[in-house]
Image: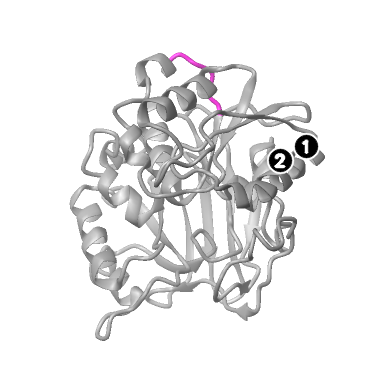
Amino acid sequence: MRFPRPLRPGDTIGVTAPSSGIRPSFRPRLDAAVRALEERGYSVVLGECLGIDGVVSAPKEQRAAELTAMLADPAIRAVVPPWGGELAIDLLDRIDWSGLADAEPTWVVGFSDLTTLMVPVTLELGWATLHGSNLMDTPYAPPEGLLHWTDVASATVPFTQTSPGRYRAHGWDDYEAEPGVCRWTLESTGTWRVLDGSAVDVTGRLIGGCIETVGPVAATPWGDVRAFGREHAAEGLVVYLEACEDGAYTIARTLHALRHAGWFEHANAVLIGRTNAPDMPDLTQAGAVADALGDLGIPIVLDVECGHVAPYLPLVNGALARVVADEDTRQITQTLA
């Protein structure tokens, strides 16, 4: 693994939208998010691919070129999108992978549709990538137990995060009406649960993302987690996945497909993010996980804060992680080495 240099005050963070852009009514929230980074001591460079011409921010050639240029620029230490979207997959054959092979690693930060690119960056280039918040979520102060993504990208020693035991069950803040919102509304209580109820204490290299976006990537040359697992067989993997919006039937099919693609061959555990994706009349989201993965013979930990339900627990693809879940503890320690 190649880990980007830890972020330091004064470093430059690039903002580009490899997927969806920003409508004018959301620009005040973008400005607030940029100020939040500047208040943390960083400089921010905005790319040209931020507007919106439909489902994506710009033509795919332009989005790929801007992302590649930011990742290759040694003055830019991290790249973060405004948010996710739908069609980042159209960049996979447009990114200059060979040109980036000799570049110094840069933090790629995001979640949702950005995992379409973050997983390939880790698998293809060997760079650690940071699954956490997108730019528009950056102003939020994390609840007790979790770290801000900039603190994770700045880490120089192993760090531990614990489940806060609170989450937001419904809805999103209105960025148009309140662009400066910076406190999560976490009205519900709940924490991780293990599928078979056993205690868990495992280690492995992290890899994963949004089920709806990494599922299609697994069928491409840029999604070979089986090979990544072989490379790290001595340590094993901790695979994390989260459902955004697909119903339980589709999630079950996609998890089965990932299993057939070898994503769990070297897994020591699987973490599943808390989700508001719909159940079906005869199959819940947890049931979909159990159907596809329940007989792997490894721990399956549900309701981890690594999905589309706030708050967000940052995870580093490629980090060595220790996951503990028992009667008293719900925590994950990551080592960026």
Pointer 1 residue: 38
Q: Quadrant of the C terminus?
A: top right
Q: Quadrant of residue 250?
A: bottom left
- Give coordinates of residue 199: x percent, y percent: 48, 71
The amino acid type, in three-letter code, at marker 2 is Val
Which structural element holds mark 1?
Answer: helix
- Give coordinates of residue 297: x percent, y percent: 29, 64
- Give coordinates of residue 335: x percent, y percent: 58, 41
The amino acid type, in three-letter code, at marker 1 is Glu
Q: Is residue 204 visible to the viewer in this orientation of the structure?
A: yes
Relative vertical location of residue 71 with respect to residue 18 in this rendering, above or below: above
Relative vertical location of residue 279 with respect to residue 120 in this rendering, above or below: below
Q: Are marks 1 and 2 in contact (CB under 8 Å)?
A: yes
Q: Which residues are magenta?
A: 102-106
Is residue 116 toward the left or the right of residue 77 in the image? left
Relative vertical location of residue 320 with respect to residue 241 in this rendering, above or below: above
Pointer 2 residue: 34
Total marks drawn?
Answer: 2
User: In front here: 9 or 28?
Assistant: 28
**Visual colour scheme:** one colour
Q: Residue furthest left?
A: 260
Give the main secondary structure, helix, strand or loop, of the magenta stretch: loop
Which structural element holds mark 2?
Answer: helix
User: In front here: 33 or 250?
Assistant: 33
Residue 125 shown in magenta: no
